[in-house]
């Protein structure tokens, strides 16, 4: 419980620290509009997170794929239909290729440094 209070205090401290600077740079109207837009985006992302949590719970409860937990594409399909499933598959593919590519670059750099020294 103490960690939660400390994290909340940190958020308020950082907000107060940078709020004045944001209003100074953006002006009263620009800063107010910016804060309103950030609030709307924050609300929307929280809504999507909650919706995803409910979908995940439903998929786990109904045990659709014979496993205990749903896959990311299943969650994408239930949340946004077929296009959501394709977008999630594309994201997973990009992440996998990116991680493998980064690992190959890391190993190549490490071997190069090892062999030259």
Image: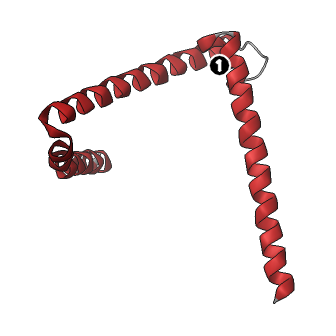
The answer to whether residue 71 of the structure is visible from this angle is no
The answer to whether residue 93 of the structure is visible from this angle is yes
Relative horizontal placement of residue 43, taking residue 100 as reference (left or right): left
What residue is shown at x 19% (from left), y 52% (from top)? Answer: 17
| 9 or 58, nearer to the observer | 9
Disc 1 crowd rating (10 Å Cα; few below 14, some 14-19, many 20+) is many
Residue at the limit of the structure toward the bottom, as seen here: 117
Relative horizontal placement of residue 54, taking residue 80 as reference (left or right): left
User: In which quadrant of the rendered view does residue 97 lie?
Assistant: top right
Q: In the rendered image, which residue does mark 1 sit on?
A: 76
What residue is shown at x 26% (from left), y 32% (from top)? Answer: 34
User: Compared with residue 76, is residue 93 higher up or lower down, i.e. above or below?
Assistant: below
User: Compared with residue 114, is residue 36 higher up or lower down, i.e. above or below?
Assistant: above
Question: Please, which colouring scheme is shown?
Answer: secondary structure
Task: Indicate the position of residue 30 as horizontal and vertical percent values.
Answer: 20, 33
Task: Indicate the position of residue 67 as horizontal and vertical percent values.
Answer: 76, 22
Q: Which quadrant: the N terminus?
A: top left
What residue is shown at x 68% (from left), y 26% (from top)? Answer: 88
User: In which quadrant of the rendered view does residue 117 lie?
Assistant: bottom right
User: Compared with residue 68, is residue 28 higher up or lower down, i.e. above or below?
Assistant: below
User: Compared with residue 72, is residue 22 higher up or lower down, i.e. above or below?
Assistant: below
Relative horizontal placement of residue 90, taking residue 8 as reference (left or right): right
| 61 or 18, nearer to the observer | 18
Mark 1 secondary-structure assignment = helix
Task: Indicate the position of residue 21 as horizontal and vertical percent values.
Answer: 18, 50
Task: Indicate the position of residue 66 as horizontal and vertical percent values.
Answer: 79, 17
């Amino acid at each position: 419980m103490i960690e939660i209070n400390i994290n909340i205090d940190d958020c308020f401290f950082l907000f107060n620290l940078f709020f004045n600077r944001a209003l100074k740079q953006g002006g009263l109207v620009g800063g107010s509009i910016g804060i309103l837009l950030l609030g709307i985006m924050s609300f929307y992302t929280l809504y999507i997170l909650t919706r995803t949590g409910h979908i995940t719970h439903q998929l786990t409860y109904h045990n659709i794929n014979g496993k205990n937990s749903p896959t990311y594409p299943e969650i994408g399909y239930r949340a946004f239909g077929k296009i959501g499933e394709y977008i999630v598959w594309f994201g997973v593919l990009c992440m996998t290729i990116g991680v493998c590519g980064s690992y190959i670059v890391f190993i190549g750099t490490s071997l190069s440094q090892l062999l030259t020294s």
